[in-house]
């Protein structure tokens, strides 16, 4: 029996796919897909409805929307407008139920991560481009921002524990207690199981967020239970486990061996190994130097810059009605 089989991923979609690859159905978990062929945008909705489903998936009950597009980091203004519009629509889908009626809606956008580490800088970069309006509306009224119904938007980049000596959730809880927003939106970099999803996937979840969980650096979660207000988590996978890359390479090698007359027997023998056995075998091969290593694309800085603009634009469209801000 293989122990401690754990492929690093923050994406609910990838957890669901892992069960499907084993031909296993998960009771209490529903998956729906939509595809925009013209704009190459695929949206997958994973709804974990029961506690049994949550236990099997290793994630809280709730709704997880995954938007995938090869153009997410593309430096093309027209593509980014379309993607931002789609993200805005999907975020609205999860926020509308938390919007109070006949009351100014207050939202706190939290940019999680370490600005000094490029693959972890997504949250701070998104926060940099958010149109903060709370101070203006409170001081001068809603017409100062040129809107009939103005939301109160505030933002914070709390840093990481290594910088502040405090749990990020502790900092955010203090801000929530003081400013009393109706909703918290936490933006963070994630880890993926598949390298093809790096910087081309956005996960939006109404279950909050657990900083560092994808890379095994577990911190206090930011959820409705811990903060006292609903929390929407938005994340983009920016890194992948080194063992996953080697494991995927081994899968390609097995397929190549199976198509070779000389190596067909060896390829078929390896095919009989379970995914768990192959993954543990890979981890043993790369130990100890590569264990715990996470890999990012070489142009991660440019990708993070572009993606952060697109996500912030989606949020600005939703809460302040602004256009593309460049």
Image (spheres, rainbow, N blue to C red):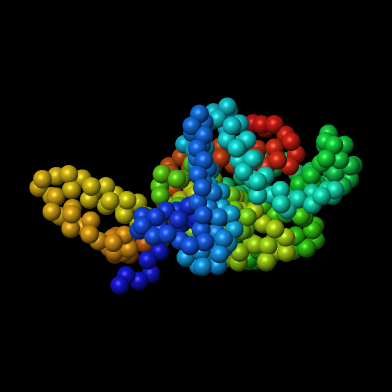
Q: Nearer the viewer, residue 130 or 299?
A: 130
- Outermost residue, right side: 140
Say above or below: 180 vs 199: below
Q: Position of residue 182 (x, y in %)?
A: 76, 55
Residue 205, horizontal then vertical, whole percent: 59, 53
User: Is 296 displayed left or right of 256 in the figure?
Assistant: right
Q: Nearer the viewer, residue 31 or 205?
A: 31
The structure residue drawn at horizontal position 83% and vertical position 34%, both measured from the top left corner, is: 146
Image point (51%, 47%), residue name = 32
Which quadrant, please, contains the N terminus? bottom left
Look at the image and tell me whether residue 291 can be seen.
Answer: yes
Q: Residue at x 89, y 42 (%)?
A: 141
State which quadrant residue 78 falls in: top right
| Residue 219, percent from left and from top | 57, 65
- Looking at the image, the residue that sits furthest to the left is 262
Q: Using residue 2 as the reference point, say whether residue 47 is left or right of it.
A: right
Q: Nearer the viewer, residue 240 or 39?
A: 39
Q: Quadrant of the C terminus?
A: top right
> Total marks drawn?
0
């Amino acid at each position: 029996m293989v122990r401690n089989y754990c492929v690093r991923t923050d994406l609910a979609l990838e957890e669901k796919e892992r069960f499907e690859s084993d031909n296993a159905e998960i009771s209490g978990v529903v998956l729906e897909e939509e595809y925009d062929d013209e704009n190459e945008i695929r949206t997958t909705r994973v709804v974990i409805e029961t506690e049994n489903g949550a236990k099997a998936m290793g994630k809280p009950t709730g709704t997880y929307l995954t938007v995938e597009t090869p153009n997410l980091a593309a430096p093309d203004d027209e593509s980014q407008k379309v993607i931002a519009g789609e993200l805005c629509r999907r975020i609205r889908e999860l926020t509308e139920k938390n919007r109070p009626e006949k009351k100014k809606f207050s939202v706190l956008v939290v940019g999680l991560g370490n600005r000094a580490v490029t693959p972890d800088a997504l949250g701070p970069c998104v926060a940099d481009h958010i149109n903060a309006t709370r101070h203006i509306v409170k001081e001068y009224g809603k017409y100062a921002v040129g809107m009939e119904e103005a939301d109160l938007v505030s933002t914070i980049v709390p840093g990481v524990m290594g910088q502040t000596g405090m749990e990020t959730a502790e900092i955010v809880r203090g801000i929530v207690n003081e400013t009393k927003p109706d909703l918290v939106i936490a933006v963070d970099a994630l880890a993926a199981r598949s390298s093809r999803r790096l910087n081309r996937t956005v996960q939006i979840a109404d279950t909050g967020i657990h900083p560092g969980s994808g890379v095994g650096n577990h911190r206090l979660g930011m959820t409705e239970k811990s903060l006292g207000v609903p929390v929407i988590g938005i994340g983009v996978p920016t890194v992948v486990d080194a063992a996953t890359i080697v494991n995927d390479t081994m899968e390609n090698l097995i397929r190549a061996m199976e198509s070779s007359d000389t190596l067909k027997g060896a390829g078929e023998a390896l095919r009989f190994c379970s995914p768990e056995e192959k993954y543990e075998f890979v981890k043993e091969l790369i130990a100890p130097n590569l264990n715990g290593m996470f890999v990012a694309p070489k142009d991660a800085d440019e990708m993070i810059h572009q993606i952060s603009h697109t996500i912030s634009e989606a949020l600005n469209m939703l809460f302040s009605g602004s256009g593309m801000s460049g």
